[in-house]
Every structure is written in C-alpha cells, then in structure tokens.
Image: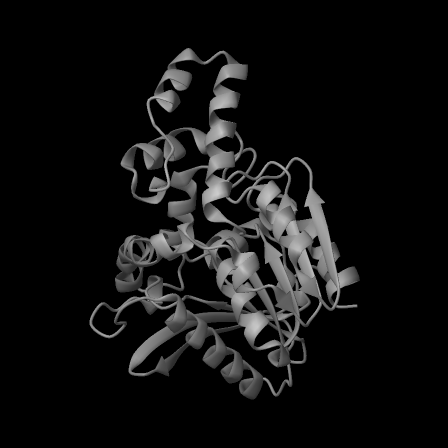
Amino acid sequence: MSSKEKSIQFFKEFIDIDGHQNGMFIETVSLENPVLLFLHGGPGFPQYPVIKQSGMGWEEDFTVCYLEQRGTGMSYNASTQGDITLGQLISDALIVTEYLKTKFKKEKIYLCGHSWGTFLGSIVVHRYPENYHAYIGIGQMGRHFESNKDTYEFLLETAIKKGDKKAEKDIRSVTFTEDFYKSKGYQRILGRYLNRFGGGAKKVGYSNWQSLKDLFSCRHYSWKERVNIPKGIFASYDALSEAIAKSDVSLLAPKIEVPVFIIHGVDDYSTSYREAKRFYEKLDASSKKLFSFNNCAHSPFIEDPNAFRNILQTEVLR
C-alpha cells in the first residue's frame, strides 16, 4: 500500500524558544513509527514541499519532523530571532529533539541532514549522541572551501569538454579565492552553470523556477510565511556563510557515537563527493557506511527516492 493510500497524519506546530517561534511540519502514517528529525539545507532553504513532490514516502517508515530552522520560512521573524549563529541553531535542534522525544514518547530519535543540514546535524549528534539512534547525512559537508574549489574546477573542465567557449570565458573571468562566499562573480557562475552542467541540486531535470513554485504553492504555508521564505534565505546565508566557508566539519565533529550513514551523489558539486568521502574516512564512529549514488548529484534522496528509502528500511532501521 502506497503512502497515498494510507492516511497521513499531518501536524503544523510551533515551539517557543526564548520568545521566538520555530515552525515545523510533522507527517506520519502511524504515531508508533520511530521519529526522524530532518534538518534542511541552504542555510535558510525549507525543503518540505520539494521532498513531498518526490513521492519518496518515508512517512510510512518514520514520523518525520521537518524543522524550519530559526530564520527560515515559517521560523523567520526579524524582531525575535536575534543573530542567527551556529551555536543558536545547535541549541534549537537539541530543544526540538527533546520536544519530539517527549511528544511521541521516545527515548531516542533519528537525525537526518541534507547539505547545510549535515554541517549542523554532524555537530549536534557528535555533542549529544545519547539522543539519537543514528545519523543520516545526505550531501554531506566537509571543508566548504575545498569543496568549492572542486566545484570551480568542475565548471571549467565541463565547459571545455562541451566546447562551450562562451561559458569557458565566463568562468575563467572569475578568480576563485578564499573569499569565494562573498564573490558576486562566483555566485553568478554557480547560478548560471552548476545545475546546467549536472552538478547542482539534481543531475538532470532541476529547475530553480520549479523549486520556487513548489515552495510558494505549498498549501500549508500562510501568505506571510511564503513571503518570508526568500527573506530567510538571504538572512541565513549572510549570517552563516563565513563560518561555513572557513570550517572543516571533520574537526567540528570528529567522533560520532551512533551508527552513521552517508548518502552522496557521485556527481555532486554543491558539496563535492571528494570532500564527503574525506569526512567519512576521517570520522570515528561506532559504525559507518557510505552509499555512493551514481548518476545523482546533490539530492540522491529526491533523484532516486526508491533506492534511498530502501537504505532506510534495510540498513538504517535494522
């Protein structure tokens, strides 16, 4: 029986943390399911609508909580959120974890992050392993500077291979430096070529416009929350980009005392496969597995949802 044929229980909730309202969507077909907290990427980019469009159906296996991190979408409120810092987001994730454990009467939950969510999630599970059954990292981050060096080289090499002289000239016009995260030129060529060359959100078939359409057409958002989505994306990136660019997740989370499952697209150049593999190899974990998805880029759980869910059922839940 598919998730469409089953009755999905849906909750839209807000939790007050120091006077700031943090929003979340929760879905499940059974309140007896194990609980999974999903930390979205970006930073500041809510992913509930996009994941739902994939039809993956993991709410059959888990009670899935899609937390919109402080400053994101329905958790955006400039007057109460204060400065968005890594420390604050770590604290928020821990408080939400405790809330979910209490609400669903669980001793532990699962933690899953995508992209920026793996940066945050790795640190949370490293510091507070007693709360979690396992950690699932999709599009795992490592060293963001080195990852973006891989990205720049991928863009240039792909333009050359394609014989696209115009793209090659455009990419060569941008010098990659340690301040890449502040470079408008670098952001421009990322936006222009990364998805087009198959190294971005999906290897094929990704459209920025479709992604925005999915977000803004999601019936569970109020109009105010929809307006706040782009505000949150810009505010979160501005607040966190430097810290992300100058960090090495393998140093921030060198040991994780729960089973770890890293799921990564081989053709991912948003967070490069090479850096994800380096993080995996350096990680000291109670157990760990790396699943490499061929013909996938940054979103293997959306690009190949059946294979992803099979890993959840046969590996993670086992």
Q: Which quadrant holds the N terminus?
A: bottom right
The residue at the point 60 percent across, 48 percent down is 276
Q: Nearer the viewer, residue 175 or 106?
A: 175
Locate residue 203 relative to residue 134 in the image: left or right. Answer: left
From what the image shows, is residue 268 above or below residue 34? above
Rendering quarter of residue 168: top left
Q: Which quadrant holds the C terminus?
A: bottom right
Residue 128 position, x and y percent, is: 57, 77
Q: Nearer the viewer, residue 230 or 98?
A: 98
From what the image shows, is residue 250 above or below residue 181? below
Residue 274 position, x and y percent, is: 61, 41
From what the image shows, is residue 99 above or below residue 120? below
Locate residue 208 relative to residue 30 in the image: left or right. Answer: left
Rendering quarter of residue 34: bottom right
Residue 188 position, x and y percent, is: 33, 33
The residue at the point 58 percent across, 48 percent down is 302
- Scheme of colours in the image: one colour
The residue at the point 50 percent across, 38 percent down is 200
From what the image shows, is residue 29 above or below residue 5? below
The residue at the point 67 percent across, 66 percent down is 60
Q: How many marks?
A: 0
Residue 167 position, x and y percent, is: 40, 19
* Res. 1 visible in picture: no
* Res. 138 visible in picture: yes
Rendering quarter of residue 184: top left
